[in-house]
Image: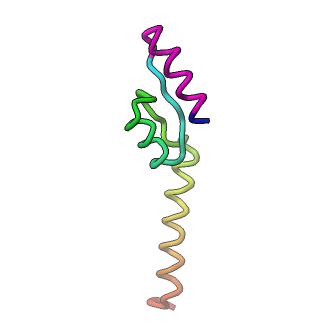
Amino acid sequence: MRESIAYLREVTAAHGVTLGICSGQPEYAAGLFADGLVNCVGLGIDLVLLNGAFGDTIAGLDSARSAGSNP
């Protein structure tokens, strides 16, 4: 995949076009930025990000409930 992104970087740079990707992996995206391969990154889509946030909230609620602070 990285080779394909590098190729697209060459093509877009030759035409003065920015290159962006969507990625759910911040570390991978940071590497692409560091290597100058992309100009912008979308880190996930709304539904994926909301699902993660809701999952964390529900896990916190379950943890508090399991602690038995309020039977």
58 and 19: which is toward the camera:
19
Q: Position of residue 31 (x, y in %)?
A: 43, 42
Which secondary structure is most common in the magenta stretch?
helix
Q: Would residue 71 be counted in the magenta stretch?
A: no
Report the magenta residues as a range: 3-17
Q: Residue at x 48, y 36 (%)?
A: 42
Q: As displayed, is residue 36 above or below residue 47?
A: above
Question: By what rule are the colours in the image chosen?
Answer: rainbow
Q: In the rendered image, which quarter is residue 16 located in?
A: top left
Q: Position of residue 59 (x, y in %)?
A: 53, 71
Q: Residue at x 46, y 10 (%)?
A: 14
Q: Would residue 5 be counted in the magenta stretch?
A: yes
- On the rendered structure, is 5 left or right of 32? right
Q: Position of residue 62 (x, y in %)?
A: 54, 77
Image quarter of the N terminus:
top right
Q: Residue at x 45, y 37 (%)?
A: 32
Q: How many marks?
A: 0
